[in-house]
Amino acid sequence: MTIPLIPIKPKRISDQVFDQIRELIFRGKLKPGEKLMTERELAQAMDVSRTTIRDAIQRLSAMGLIVQKQGQGTFVKPYDTSHENPLAKAIEAQNASIEDLLEVRIGLECNAASLAALRADESDIKAMTRSIEEMQQEVASGRLGTEADTSFHMAIAYAAKNPIHILIMRNFYDYLFHGIRESLESLYEKPANIQAIIKQHSTILAAITSRDADASYSAMKIHIRFVMEFFSKRFPG
């Protein structure tokens, strides 16, 4: 019997640089608006040539993850406004409600949580744990915790190991947490809601850590249903 094996190709160094910087952005370690090190500094830190760094930077720029400003340097791209985010433009064209968006979240994120339970590695688990801790710290310092909330859900998307899902979720969250920030902030203004969300995040993380795909799916669904219920009461149809 002939087995259809495919020859293994060594990964280019520039691909490894690209993957590493992209991961830092998706995991929130490099935040929107943050300045990257110079090409020379990146080359020294990663022990590669400046040409390799330049190639990776060009690819990240083409993906819309970073922007290069003449005379200033390279920055992680700030959150898109509705005019720049193609997904946001499509959503606004449909006059979508928050409830519409949350229904989409159920499909995207319950599936992501289920896949994360099967595919997450140790760094993914650490990223989710750190996001929960950061949300607690943000709330304790008087902030709303929305940035850490975003990081938690993006960490799950990344743990699902599907690059298309990651890109969709990034654009979706740009709109959900920043394009309609004023509408969403009402959820975070009540301390009881914040504590409930943190507890729900912890339950999702526990299910993913236990490698229980069904429990992860259910825990995420309960979380999003909680948010949906809040807005259905706030804006009854």
Image (cartoon, rainbow, N blue to C red):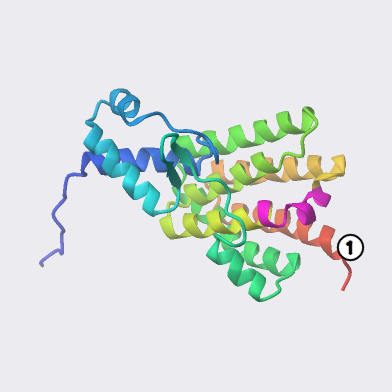
Q: Which stretch did the figure color magenta?
A: 178-187
Residue 148 figure quarter: top right
14 is higher (above) or lower (below) than 92 = above
Residue 92: image location, x then y, percent:
66, 70
**Is 69 situated above or below 103?**
above
In the image, is 222 to the left or to the right of 15? Answer: right
Left or right of residue 62: residue 229: right
Residue drawn 74% across the image and 64% down it: 98
162 and 84: which is toward the camera: 84
At horizontal 55% and vertical 61% (from top left) the residue drawn is 85
Percent x, y for residue 116?
50, 50
Closer-to-camera residue (147/8): 147
Q: Where is residue 111 in the image (x, y as percent from the top left)?
A: 55, 60
Give the residue at mark 1: 233
Residue 149 lies in quadrant: top right
- 95 or 205, which is in the foreground? 95
Q: Measuring from the top left, give residue 73's x and y in whole percent.
A: 42, 35
Could you tell me if residue 94 is visible in this image? yes
**Is residue 234 a member of the stretch shown in magenta?**
no
